[in-house]
Image: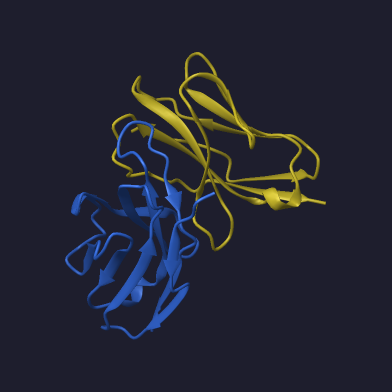
Chain colours: A blue, B yellow
């Protein structure tokens, strides 16, 4: 089965530093997403992306966050100035369809620790 | 969107059938039901989705009664590797991939 690949699996950073989390979605998928899960809490939607534009974003996705599809295979999430509360597991996902009965494929996540 | 309610945890033994029920009393006509599975330190994995009656795939069955106010995920003959969190989601047709996850049901399968 095709997979969504995320790198790195773990990222440790100092508060105030910029981090870029990387994802390679499934090759024929056109819709991309970032979710996050703080330890012991629910999986939360951050942003959806299609055709080089943000389709929808949550309240969590403030000006410190940005997404980009820099080439035909990668999809990145940048946090400009990390805060302690950004520590979480970040999941990238992709889907073939963007509406209707959407089926998301998630990666294994990047565990971000902000010190 | 309809709020979902499911048990926080369940225990089972290897080889048993497990049924996890989810209630969604305020489901709308253009909503469908989707279940995801999540293992520790991994992303959620799609299991099954349906609108009404019964859907079956190689992993599970989903039973949805006529009033659609609840649904039951059935896992046949579970093994230790089925220990995971199972999420019931109500998704509106036309949704752009923004899934709302609840706390899910933590299934512990014992030997």
Q: Nearer the viewer, residue B19 or B49?
A: B49
Q: What residue is shown at x 43% (from left), y 65% (from top)?
A: A6
Q: Does residue A103 appear left or right of residue B7 in this picture?
A: left
Mark count: 0
Q: What residue is shown at x 33% (from left), y 31% (from top)?
A: A100
Q: Quadrant of residue B14?
A: top right
Which corner quadrant holds the N terminus of chain B? top left
Q: Is residue B47 above or below residue A114?
A: above
Q: Nearer the viewer, residue B70 or B33?
A: B33
Q: Nearer the viewer, residue A33 or B111?
A: A33
Percent position (x, y) of residue B94? 28, 31
Percent position (x, y) of residue B19? 66, 33
Percent position (x, y) of residue A107? 46, 58
Q: What residue is shown at x 38% (from left), y 61% (from top)?
A: A24
Q: What residue is shown at x 36% (from left), y 68% (from top)?
A: A22
Whether residue B2 appears in this view of the structure is no
Q: Is residue A41 above or below residue B103?
A: below
Q: Nearer the viewer, residue B97 or A72?
A: A72
Whether residue A30 appears in this view of the structure is yes
Q: Is residue B79 above or below residue A9?
A: above
Q: Does residue A14 appear left or right of residue B75 in this picture?
A: left
Percent position (x, y) of residue A115? 38, 84
Q: Does residue B30 appear left or right of residue A108 in this picture?
A: left
């Amino acid at each position: 089965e095709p997979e969504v690949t995320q790198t790195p699996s773990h990222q440790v950073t100092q508060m105030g530093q910029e981090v870029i989390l990387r994802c390679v979605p499934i090759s024929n998928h056109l819709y991309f997403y970032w979710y996050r899960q703080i330890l012991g809490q629910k999986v939360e939607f951050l942003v959806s992306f299609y055709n080089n534009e943000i389709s929808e974003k949550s309240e969590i996705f403030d000006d410190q966050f940005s997404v980009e599809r820099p080439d035909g295979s990668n999809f990145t999430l940048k946090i400009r100035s990390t805060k302690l509360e950004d520590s979480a597991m970040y999941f990238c996902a992709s889907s073939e369809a963007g509406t209707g009965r959407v089926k998301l494929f998630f990666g294994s996540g990047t565990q971000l620790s902000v010190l | 969107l309809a709020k979902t309610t499911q048990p926080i945890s369940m225990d089972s033994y290897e080889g048993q059938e497990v049924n996890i029920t989810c209630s969604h009393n305020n489901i709308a006509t253009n909503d469908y039901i989707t279940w995801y599975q999540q293992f520790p330190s991994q992303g959620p994995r799609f299991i099954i989705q349906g609108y009404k009656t019964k859907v079956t795939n190689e992993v599970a069955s989903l039973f949805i009664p006529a009033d659609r106010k609840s649904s039951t995920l059935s896992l046949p003959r579970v093994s230790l590797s089925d220990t995971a969190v199972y999420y019931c989601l109500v998704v509106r047709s036309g949704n752009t991939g923004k899934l709302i996850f609840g706390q899910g049901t933590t299934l512990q399968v014992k030997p």
